[in-house]
Amino acid sequence: MYAVIRSGGKQYRVTPGQTLRLEKLEGETGSKIQLSDVLLVEDGGKVQTGAPLPNASVEATIIQSDRSDKILVFKKKRKKQYRRTRGHRQDFTAVRIEKISV
């Protein structure tokens, strides 16, 4: 059994027991959340689709809320003495998928 969910403008294929990193979500570590934006559910060869599916949800537990490693963004124009360096750290929430229900 798997589902396709939408979170933070991205789509993820999830299965029960899976751990994944999503965009920053509200909630404390250890709390349960409902992801109701389910686009597809496959259960034993039977596929249901919708945008989003009514009465479908994915239950997950928040494991961690943190920031990713820093990435450097460097801009340069040759022969013009133009250089700019900026850093960025993206917030994320790590969740474990507990149950998919339709």
Image (spheres, helix red, strand yellow):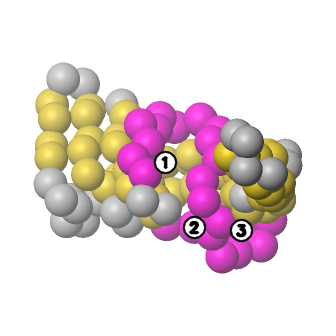
Q: Is residue 27 above or below residue 40?
A: below
Q: Residue 38: x, y in percent?
A: 32, 55
Circle 3 residue = 31
Give x and y (percent) for residue 75. Answer: 71, 49
Q: Which residue is mark 2?
A: 33
For mark 3, does the 10 Å Cα neighbourhood hold few (<14), some (14 to 19), or many (20 or more) residues? few
What is the distance, in whole Å, between disc 3 and disc 2 at their CAs?
A: 7 Å
Residue designated by label 1: 99
Secondary-structure class at tag 1: strand
Q: Earlier in the sequence, mark 3 or mark 1?
A: 3
Name the secondary structure under disc 2.
strand
Q: Amino acid at mark 1?
A: Lys
Which residue is pictured at 16% across the width and 35% down the height?
Answer: 47
Please tell me whether mark 3 sits on a helix, a strand or a loop. loop
Q: Earlier in the sequence, mark 1 or mark 2?
A: 2
Amino acid on which disc 2 is placed = Ile
Does 38 appear in magenta? no
- The residue nearer to you, when weighing 83 against 22, is 83
